[in-house]
Amino acid sequence: MNSAKTWLAPAKLNLFLRITGRRTDGYHLLQTLFQIVDLYDELKFHPREDQQITLRNQPADWSQQQDLCVRAAKLLAPLCPKPVGIDIELTKKIPIGAGLGGGSSDAATTLIALNHYWGLNLNKQQLCEIGLQLGADVPLFIFGQTAWAEGIGEELSAVDLPHHWYLIVTPDCQVPTATIFTSEQLTRNSPSITIRAYLDGLDQSIHPLESVSQSELTKNDCLPVVRSLYPAVDAAFNWLQQHGMAQLSGTGASLFCECKTQAAAQQIQQLVPTGWQSFVVQSVLHPEIDD
């Protein structure tokens, strides 16, 4: 095992998010468009002589047993022909509780890396099925590219979009996904749209009556709930809206706006208030996995 290798776990943005219903088991049905961007957590994997699976560099107040990387490794370990142990060295750069998918991406990268190191030869579909046990966003990062998602987020279809730059702004707060999805204020009956209608809406050459409106293209049903429950996110939204079309990623707390160029994004970034994190990112595919 090459324990010196650094594996990159990218963040994601939700370019829109519609809650279209709710299953009898409580999971929400949704439509969203996931865009992977070049903001990364970093992971390294160090083999152990015993059968322990541990996490290094864990954030403060972090539970080893609940960590998605540890849980991912524990799902794969029984599939190995002989006992295995691993130290997972995690360097967090994606904000926690920010709607950017950092934990899910870390879990997916752990599955991909240990599948490689442990010689399990599982294909992407098998890894996605395992990853879904850890969270609805995990299959996205195994799928590894811009994706239209339906169901609870696991039904993925590849979508080709133009390259874009984004400014991400994350105020000093965390938004638990469960808090938003259990809120009585959450809209749960948004009408579905098709991939074609969405892409036609992006095409300015198509007559407006034949396409989806701009507000519908960027709609996130979680935004009103997040803004009402988290004043810091509301303040960040109002600030970013002065500089572009502010959007919420996932259930928050991160907001973002599309920018025409890297320089334009950096110019707005210079104005970000003290105490908020900010990142200038571009749309990318998942890094290629190799030795």
Image (spheres, grey):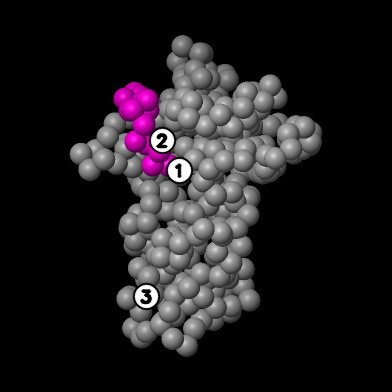
| Residue pictured at 51% horizontal, 13% vertical | 207
| Magenta stretch: includes residue 275 | no
| Magenta stretch: includes residue 185 | yes
Range of residues picked out in magenta: 176-191
The mark found on residue 176 in the picture is 1
As shown in the figure, which amino acid type bears the numbered disc 1? Answer: Pro
Label 1 – label 3 distance at C-alpha:
29 Å
Q: Main secondary structure of the magenta part?
A: loop
Q: On the image, numbered disc 3 is attached to which residue?
A: 77
Q: Residue furthest bottom?
A: 49
Residue nearest the viewer, comparing 52 with 101? 52
Q: Position of residue 234 (x, y in %)?
A: 57, 27
Q: On the image, numbered disc 2 is attached to which residue?
A: 180
Quarter of the image with the N terminus is bottom right
| Residue pictured at 46% horizontal, 54% vertical | 104
Asked if marks 1 and 2 touch (Cβ < 8 Å), the reply is yes
Asked if marks 3 and 2 touch (Cβ < 8 Å), the reply is no
As shown in the figure, which amino acid type bears the numbered disc 3? Answer: Ala
Q: Is residue 93 left or right of residue 53?
A: right
Quarter of the image with the C terminus is bottom right
Instruction: Tell me how many marks there are.
Output: 3
Q: Position of residue 17 (x, y in %)?
A: 44, 32
Question: Secondary structure under badge 2?
Answer: helix
Question: Secondary structure under badge 1?
Answer: loop
Asked if marks 1 and 3 touch (Cβ < 8 Å), the reply is no
